[in-house]
Image: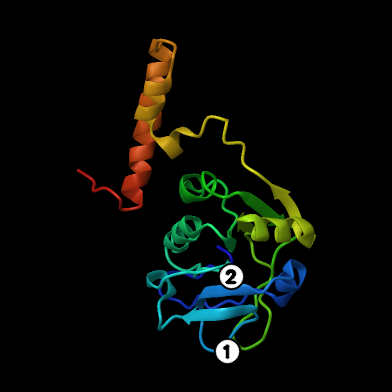
C-alpha cells in the first residue's frame, strides 16, 4: 500500500505537488475535494471542502480531481462523477489490474497520462512524503484537459483502443457468451464457468454479494 493510500479510518489528506500544476499550466473552474479552506496548491476558481462534500454538489466547468485515496475503492464514486461530468483532469492510483480500473477507468477515460517516476505527495504540514509504492495516472476528459496533458511533458500519454474486446470481468461472462459467434466447445464452456466462479468469489470478498 502506498503512503498516500492509508488504511480505512486514517487520514488521506495528501496534496498534489505543485509541479504538476506548473506543467499543466491551467486554471481550473472547480476542485470538488479540497481538504480545507486555503489548503493545497490547486489553481481553481471554486473549491468544495470536506464539509461541503463535493461528491454531493453540482460540478461545473473544467474540473481538477484528486479524490480521497483512503478506504476500499474510495476513489470510485468520485471517478464515476468525474467521467459523467466529462471535462477536466483527474488523478488516481495507477492500479491497472484492479477490477475498478477495468470497470470505471478504461471504458471511459479519453486520455491516460502516466507520469515518469513516482509522484511524491505533500503532507498538510508542508513536508513531502516518501516515494510511494504505487504510481499514479492522470485522466483527461475534454479538449482542454487532454491538450494540457499532451503538452505537459509529465509522462507518457495513451488512449484506449475501444474496438478491442473488453475483459470478461469488465462486461460479465454472460454477455461474452451471448457475443460469441462460434459454438462453445466443452473446453471453452469449462473455461467460462471457471471465470464466472472466480468473478463471483471476488465479488463476495469485496462484500458486494453475501456468502451462502
Residue drawn at x 35%, y 25% as measured from the top left: 193
Residue in the foreground of this view, choosing between 128 and 154: 154
Look at the picture and state if 76 lies above or below 178: below
Q: Are marks 1 and 2 in contact (CB under 8 Å)?
A: no
Q: Position of residue 201 (x, y in %)?
A: 34, 41
Of the numbered discs 1 and 2, the one sitting upstream in the chain is: 2
Displayed quadrant of residue 154: bottom right
Q: CA distance from mark 1 to mark 2?
A: 23 Å
Task: Name the secondary structure under disc 2.
Answer: loop
The residue beneath circle 2 is: 3
Q: Which mark is residue 38?
A: 1
Mark 1, residues whose alpha carbon is within 10 Å: few (<14), some, or many (≥20)?
few
The answer to whether residue 114 shows anywhere in this view is yes
> Residue 166 vs residue 15: left or right?
left
Look at the picture and state if 89 lies above or below 205: below
Quadrant of the drawing holding the C terminus: top left
Q: How many marks?
A: 2
Way the structure is coloured: rainbow
Task: Name the secondary structure under disc 1.
Answer: loop
Q: Position of residue 204 (x, y in %)?
A: 31, 47
Q: Position of residue 152 (x, y in %)?
A: 77, 62
> Residue 34 vs residue 189: left or right?
right
Q: Which mark is residue 68?
A: none
Amino acid at each position: 500500500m502506498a503512503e498516500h493510500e492509508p488504511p480505512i479510518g486514517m487520514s488521506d489528506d495528501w496534496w498534489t505537488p505543485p509541479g504538476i500544476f506548473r506543467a499543466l499550466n491551467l486554471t481550473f473552474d472547480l476542485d470538488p475535494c479540497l481538504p480545507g479552506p486555503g489548503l493545497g496548491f490547486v489553481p481553481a476558481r471554486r473549491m468544495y471542502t470536506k464539509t461541503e462534500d463535493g461528491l454531493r454538489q453540482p460540478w461545473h466547468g473544467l474540473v481538477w480531481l484528486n479524490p480521497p485515496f483512503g478506504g476500499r475503492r474510495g476513489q470510485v464514486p468520485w471517478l464515476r462523477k468525474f467521467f459523467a461530468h466529462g471535462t477536466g483532469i483527474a488523478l488516481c492510483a495507477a492500479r491497472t489490474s484492479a477490477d475498478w480500473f477495468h470497470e470505471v477507468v478504461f471504458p471511459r477515460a479519453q486520455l491516460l497520462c502516466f507520469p515518469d517516476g513516482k509522484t511524491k505527495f505533500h503532507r498538510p504540514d508542508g513536508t513531502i512524503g516518501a516515494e510511494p509504492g504505487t504510481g499514479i495516472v492522470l485522466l483527461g476528459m475534454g479538449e482542454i484537459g487532454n491538450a494540457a496533458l499532451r503538452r505537459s511533458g509529465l509522462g507518457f500519454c495513451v488512449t484506449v483502443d475501444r474496438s478491442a474486446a473488453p475483459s470478461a470481468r469488465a462486461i460479465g461472462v454472460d454477455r461474452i457468451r451471448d457475443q460469441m459467434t462460434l459454438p462453445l466447445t466443452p473446453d471453452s464452456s469449462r473455461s467460462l464457468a471457471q471465470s464466472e466462479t472466480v468473478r463471483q468469489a471476488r465479488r463476495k470478498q469485496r462484500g458486494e454479494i453475501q456468502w451462502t
